[in-house]
Amino acid sequence: MEEERRVHPDCINASNPYHKCVEYCFRKIAEAKARKDKEETEENSDDDNDHPVEENSEGDITKLTGRQKKLFELRLKMNEARKANQTAMVAEKKRMEAPSESRGISKQKWLEERKKKIGKLLDANGLDLQKAYMLDTQEAAEAKYKKWEKDPAPFGWDVFNQKTLYNAYKKRTKNVDVDLEEYNKMKEADPEFYREASSLQYGKAPKISEDKIDKMVKELKDREEKRQSFSRRRKFHEEKDIDSINDRNEHFNKKIERAFGKYTLEIKNNLERGTALPD
């Protein structure tokens, strides 16, 4: 097909099925080949000029004259300086422009470093990298599991969902002492201990001892005291102007500032400068 279309394989338009090489194409191909041959000869001559003394240094270094020896030493120093500059430049570039790695690349790099560290131990015990946890000590495993079991604090709408409320209930009842013997006796004495909606005793309060009521009241009081003592630490700015007489007034002023601060900013600045007062 190429012979029928008279297309030279080195032509830049050889991929075009409708192209046919003419005299201009052959002239450009010949110029490109001549240019390529010239560049190759120049590269070979540069290589020969760069290493003439090095070739002589293998066996003919003793035959060099004084000037040739000085030239040889200068070239060695130039090569050492060029290598040192290149190394310093690469190190500075790595230090100034550190590549930003994504999460997956960082994890892969961490796995490779970890595999290098424990590779010998894994090979000695005949284990795979996925079973590297078998080399952990008891203390390390307990610390790892304790970290995993720690749940984050609820946030936003999750504060009032059923799971969070149930966890709060379990936390409150963790310190409550349960007398199972008394519980079983009460259940045996009352056939309708677990009342249903159809029971005639539904809604009737069972008999509860005074000490149980006192425990419940004590738990409620402790919870109220704990709620009142809880306070989130907030940043204190020393350079901020004091415009309140107590904490409650400061909180009120903050709410007023959020609502009307942008409207009263000019008046406030005029009062501070004294320009709002009459002459």
Image (cartoon, grey):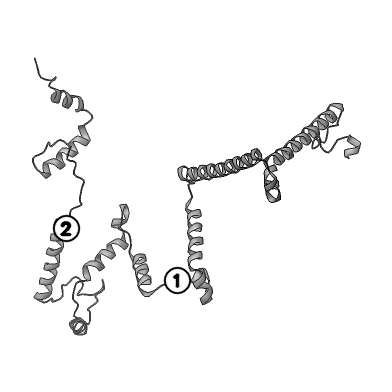
> Viewer-proximal residue, 20 or 261?
20
Q: Is residue 250 left or right of residue 119?
A: left
Q: Residue furthest right?
A: 4
Choose top left, top right, bottom left or bottom right for residue 139.
bottom left
Residue 26 position (above or below residue 72): above
Residue 140 lies in quadrant:
bottom left
Foreground tag (2 vs 1): 1
What residue is shown at x 67% (from left), y 46% (from top)?
A: 54
Q: Position of residue 196 (x, y in %)?
A: 26, 73
Side of 114 where 38 appears, left or right: right
Q: Nearer the viewer, residue 261 or 115?
A: 115
Marks 2 and 1: CB-CB under 8 Å? no
Name the image quarter holding the N terminus: top right
Give above or below for 129 relative to 256: below
Q: Amino acid at mark 2?
A: Arg
Look at the image and tell me in which quarter the C terminus lies: top left
| SS for dot 1 | helix
Q: Residue 203 location, x and y as percent?
A: 19, 70
Give the left or right position of residue 215, taking residue 263 as reference.
left
Q: Nearer the viewer, residue 210 or 74?
A: 74
* Position of residue 67 measured from the top left corner of the image (x, y, whole percent): 64, 38
Q: Amino acid at mark 1?
A: Tyr
Q: Residues within 10 Å of mark 2 (few under 14, many from 20)?
A: few
Quadrant of the rendered image containing residue 9? top right
Q: Residue drawn 48% across and 57% down? A: 107
Q: Which mark is residue 177?
A: none
* Disc 2 target residue: 227
Q: Where 63 sits versus 41, above or below?
A: below
Q: CA distance from mark 2 to mark 1?
A: 42 Å
Q: Earlier in the sequence, mark 2 or mark 1?
A: 1
In the picture of the structure, the residue carrying the numbered disc 1 is 133
